[in-house]
Image (cartoon, grey):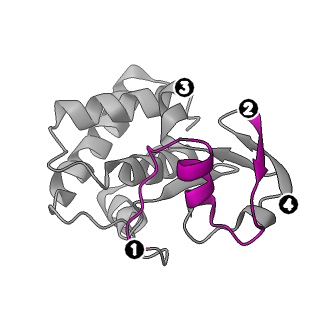
Amino acid sequence: MAYRVEINGEARELDVPADMPLLWALRNELGMVGTKFGCGIGACGACTVHVDGVATRSCSLRVGSIGDRKITTIEALEESPVGRALQQAWLDEDVMQCGYCQAGQLMNASALLARNPQPNAQQIDQAMSGNICRCACYTRIRKAIVAVVEHKETANVGDHDA
């Protein structure tokens, strides 16, 4: 069946079964391989995308259920000020080790900062707890998020779109 979905601000056609996970439509049908397969059951967060701004596991979201909701993937993260700031903080704090989970980590972090521009350490840990990093880079991930929050405070940045 054919579906028209909005991904990264662009209308895309998907001729796939309704029960196909968005993850596989992104990767196999559209060639958008930034979103990673981790566990396939929505437990690890490697496949995190935004659905209307909310961090969502794309391995658990069926294409047939998307409707007119807007999908944002890691490929479009740099289009927002918060996304660019997070990517830079990830580099500055040397967050990545193997890097496999980082697209999902970044997407989850940007959704957090979009809904709560000034989270405390506990709120960061709670929001990020569903994203697994096999290399255990959790301290550096939190440090990078805090760096963005602190920079936004000092810079008085008003644009919190993610």
Mark 4 or mark 2, earlier in chain: 4
Q: Which residues are magenta?
A: 10-39
Query: Disc 4 designates what residue?
Result: 1
Query: Disc 2 designates what residue?
Result: 10
Residue flagged by tag 2: what amino acid is it?
Glu
Q: In percent of the image, x 35 and y 25: which residue is there?
A: 154
Q: In percent of the image, x 28 and y 53: which residue is there?
A: 100
User: Can you give x and y, in whole percent of width and height, for residue 75 in the image?
Assistant: 50, 35
Mark 2 or mark 3, earlier in chain: 2
Question: Which numbered disc, 4 or 2, marks the residue closer to the eye?
Answer: 4
SS for dot 4: loop
Distance from the alpha carbon under mark 1 to that under mark 4:
26 Å
Distance from the alpha carbon under mark 2 to that under mark 3:
13 Å
Name the residue nearer the viewer: 157 or 82.
82
Name the residue nearer the viewer: 99 or 33.
33
Can you see residue 14? yes
Q: Residues within 10 Å of mark 2 (few under 14, many from 20)?
A: few
User: Can you give x and y, in whole percent of width and height, for residue 143 in the image?
Assistant: 21, 46
Q: Find residue 95 and report its image quarter.
A: top left
